[in-house]
Amino acid sequence: MNWLKKIIRTFFYVLSGSILSTAIFITIFWPGLTFPITIVWQVIIMSAITSCGILFFYSKREISKKQMKVRLVLHYTYINVIVLGVAILCHWIDPTNLVQVVSMIFLVAAVYISVNLAMFNHEKRTADHINQRLRSKYPDEKKEE
């Protein structure tokens, strides 16, 4: 069940980043544009699909550094394929316009980094909280160094 919470948390981080990126993209390429509500739903659906990519990191066993690097590359590729595919399919970008495509890839990278940092900080705070509670529960235990 923990992985489901992680997907939901990731979804909200991705959705926030996607909305911000959408605002930036539209401001740069189509200032003054008004658009139908369907675009908001497209962004929500795209965010949900990309959030499921967190399952690339799911494993019942501990994974090696090499495996983690491979999964990071696969995950980032998955995100780009989904976002660029949806952007082309929904006519958010003109695939022949290199500036739009590169800008979209840059925004994807920015959201990807931001979401990963937010997730890392959340998990670090959780681990710190658990460690603090363990230290308070077992204060007499000596550290092994």
Image: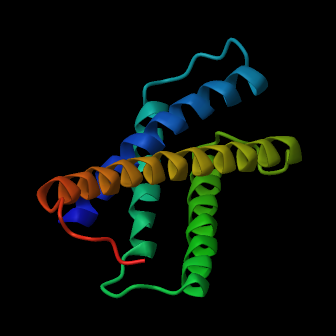
Split into 4 quadrants, where in the image is the N terminus?
bottom left
Q: Residue 44, relative to residue 1: is it above or below?
A: above
* Residue at the outermost left position: 137
Image label count: 0
Please state which of residues 78 and 94 is positioned toward the viewer in this rendering: 78
Q: Residue furthest right?
A: 98
Q: Nearer the viewer, residue 117 or 34?
A: 117
Q: Position of residue 51 (x, y in %)?
A: 42, 56
Q: Is residue 48 left or right of residue 81?
A: left
Q: Is residue 110 left or right of residue 48?
A: right
Up/down of 139 relative to 65, above or below = above
Determine which quarter of the picture holds residue 7: bottom left
In this rendering, position of residue 128 left or right of residue 57: left
Residue 93 placement (x, y as % from top left): 71, 42
Q: Residue at point 37% right, 76% down?
A: 58
Residue 94 % position (x, y): 76, 44
Camera-nearest residue between 102 and 145: 145
